[in-house]
Every structure is written in structure tokens, then in C-alpha cells.
Amino acid sequence: MTDDDRVFKALADRTRRFLLDLLFVRDGRTLTELESELEMTRFGVMKHLRVLEDAGLVVTRRSGREKLHFLNPVPIRLIHDRWIDKYTERQVSALTDLKTELEEEA
Amino acid sequence: MTTMTGTTGTVQVYRVYIRATPEAIWEAITTPEWTQRYGYGSPVEYELRPGGAYRGLATAEMKAMGGEDVVVDGEVLEADPPRRLVQTWRARWLGEGFTRLTWEIEEGDSGVTTLTVTHDVDGAPSTAAQVAGTVPNAGGGWSYILSDLKTLLETGRPLAG
């Protein structure tokens, strides 16, 4: 599996995207903090975090006794630069602008 | 790091895997010849010893927009080439204090090196937004810089080039 494969696989799951969103809002959380936001066993959350870590989307750091989880946005940026820029950035941003505008009006 | 706690959210961590030697990555971070070729293209000046000065200079484009000659400044706290560089870091136009920046370079298997950038932006919310790339039309922050650095070192060309 390539690095990109691991990132796409990690992102292809709602729970894992939710975990990334949680870290985006506030970084550097413990497993216990993350677990409290999910209806899932601690073991289940650990498994998802492991997949995110293997894909490089989450980086862990030790702080005293705690293991903190940080969102690492670089792999997503690399996919953006590789897949979005190359093909369609101009068109895509025009369309997302339109979508935002229409949704704001609605 | 002592300020790293689970509740403040003031530390940002960025990691990228680069097919290059630790020495090449160290050079790319600390010499103006390299830093002009990726990211925002700002030439750097590093005195690579504890207490040494660090400056990020304005590009011609930044100067044309009325910027000062030195856009980022700070002090080198630790320099252990090609493994670890700890420094303070202040974006002068933001009007905030010095933050703490740590570069860690770790050689891995089969020629892939891990570069981890840890930016402790405690007490500097504008700096935090700037380096996270969440300020509209103000660049992509560390993610953009590191993505571009990886591309340059692996392909010999930056993203835009």
C-alpha cells in the first residue's frame, strides 16, 4: 500500500473523519477525551486512531503520563496538491464558491 | 515540552516523510539557497548555535507589497545538525510575541526520513491561525511549506515551478 492509499483508506470511514474533525477543533487530546465524544468502546476508538496514525493523519506525543493526539494535516495537503491542483482547482473552487453562495442564500 | 497539555490546544504538530537524507533536509531548512526554492520563498539567515540569531527575509514580492526587510525573526535555542533544531519564531507583521518551533529529523528505513515540525504557539492566536493556514488569502502555513519541501527534495522542482 502506498502512502496515498493509506490516507484514502483512513478517510473512507465516518468515525475516523469525525475523529479528525474533533482534533481540528481542539488538538492534543488524550484517548479518554476522544472516547467521550463517541458512542464506541475504548478499544474501537483505539483501532480507528491506529489507522489514522498509520496514515500519518494523527501524530502522538507523550506529555508526562499522557499520550496526546495531534492532527497532522500534511498528508491531506499532499493529496490536495497531487490530486486537486493538478486537475481541477480552478473549476472546483468556482463550483464550491457557487455552492457556498447558493447555500448561504437559501 | 512543558507547555504541551491536552486542554490548551496551543501546540501544532506537522509531520512529513521525505525520500531524502537527514543532511539534505537540514540544508533545505537552514540555508537561504534552499529556502528560496519552496514555501513562501523567504531566504533565511541562521546562526546555528544556542543564542544565535534567526531571520526570515522578505522576498521581492513581499517588499513590493510594502513589507519590512525582516519578516520573521527569532533565536536559535538548540542546533544539533542534522537531527534537531529548536528556535524561537515571531512573525513580525502579526504583532505577537515569540513562539517556540522545534524541527526533528529522523532517519528511517529505505531512504525515507521523517521530518516533524512542532510549533508551540501558546499565547499567540494570530500566529496559530497563520501557521495553520486558516487565514484566508494568507498562504497555506506549515502544511503547504512541508508539502512543497517534500516535492522539491524528491523531484528537484517545487510545486509551483
Image (cartoon, rainbow, N blue to C red):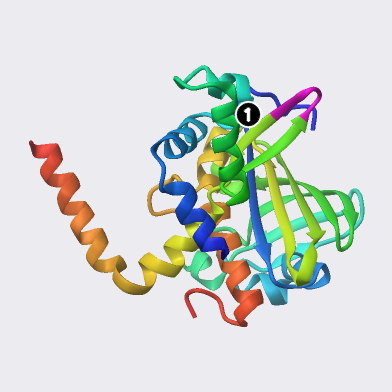
Check the residue under mark 1 and report the chain it is in.
Answer: B
Identify the main secondary structure in magenta: strand
User: In terms of depth relative to the viewer, which is nearer, B159 or A17?
Assistant: A17
User: In terms of depth relative to the viewer, which is nearer, A27 or B107?
Assistant: B107
Q: Is residue B96 visible?
A: no
Q: Residue at x 66, y 75 (%)?
A: B153
Q: In the figure, residue A100 lies in which quadrant? A: top left
Place of residue A14 in the rendered image (x, y in percent of width and height, measured from the top left): 39, 38
* Above-or-below relation of A97 to A35: below
Place of residue B60 in the rendered image (x, y in percent of width and height, measured from the top left): 54, 72
Q: In the figure, residue B101 lies in which quadrant? A: top right
Write down the residue under mark 1. B123
Q: Residue at x 15, y 53 (%)?
A: A98
Q: Please tell me how many numbered marks the rendered image carries.
A: 1
- Residue at the left extreme, as displayed: A106
Q: Amino acid at mark 1?
A: Gly
| Relative to B34, A74 lies left or right | left
Please tell me whether mark 1 sits on a helix, a strand or a loop: loop
- Residue at the top extreme, as displayed: A36
Would you say residue A65 sits in the magenta stretch?
Answer: yes
Q: Is residue A51 visible?
A: yes
Would you say residue B11 sits in the magenta stretch?
Answer: no
Q: Residue at x 79, y 58 (%)?
A: B105
User: In terms of depth relative to the viewer, which is nearer, B143 or B15?
Assistant: B15
Magenta region: A63-67
Q: In the figure, residue A84 lies in which quadrant? A: bottom left
